[in-house]
Amino acid sequence: MEQLEKYDEYLKEHLSQKRYTHSKNVSDASVMLAKKFGYPDVEKARFAGLVHDICKEEPEDVQYTLMMQSAMDVCAEERSAFKVWHGIAGAELLRTKFGVTDMDVLSAVRYHTIARAGMSDLEKIVYLADMISVERDYPDVETMRKKVLESLDEGMGYALKYSLMKLVRRDALIPHHTVEAYNEILNKLHRQEG
């Protein structure tokens, strides 16, 4: 999709080797999840996974400027948390510099750190691929991988709980998008249980 080589070259120039490798791994994990769960556009999943961290290593002022240009509902909690700026900035860079207009791809990049209610399958795939990419070695990553392979919703439920607990332990502000995503997925999983 969209001349993948062009983006690959851009990432090689703008990311460290470690972050570039992570981007390739998330792309591979996105393809694996797309195939496993019957997502119809595997190449779109490959592309979204590849570019999810396109702004991760841009300077703070560049990320801030791009984030503030975004029309994608940036909340106060996000504006105060540098760690999540790169997703918002990345979507804006893809839109303005590269002319990407596919809102599903832009949303997958924009929400890959915080999630949101009403996520598409592509958004879930990229969010979860980022959590389970092959180089990840945080505590509980094997349980995360197991849950993700059960279903996208099981994976989202486990991943959001993990992320929320991490934020609470750090005394970090929690974007309303994350809370809404958690409540939505929990309600869905409870309904499925009966």
Image: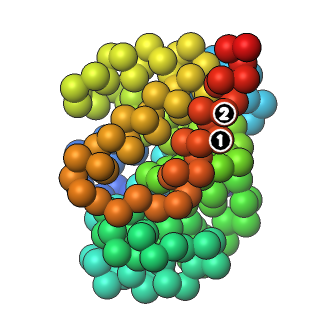
Q: Is residue 81 above or below residue 122?
A: below
Please name whichever residue, 8 or 81, is drawn nearer the observer in this view of the structure.
Answer: 81
Q: Quadrant of residue 81?
A: bottom left
Q: Is residue 142 above or below residue 1?
A: above
Circle 1 packing at 10 Å, graded few (<14), some (14-19), many (20+), is some
The extreme right residue here reads 40
Q: Is residue 127 above or below residue 86?
A: above
Q: Is residue 129 visible?
A: no
Q: CA distance from mark 2 to mark 1?
A: 5 Å
Q: Amino acid at mark 1?
A: Glu
**Picture coordinates of residue 23, whole percent (x, y):** 39, 44
Please name whichever residue, 10 or 78, is drawn nearer the observer in this view of the structure.
Answer: 78
Q: Residue at x 54, y 33 (%)?
A: 156
Please tell me whether mark 1 sits on a helix, a strand or a loop.
helix
Q: Is residue 34 above or below residue 163?
A: above
Residue at the disc numbered 2: 187
Q: Residue at x 55, y 85 (%)?
A: 69
Q: Are marks 2 and 1 in contact (CB under 8 Å)?
A: yes
Please name whichever residue, 156 or 57, is drawn nearer the observer in this view of the structure.
Answer: 156
Q: Which mark is residue 184?
A: 1
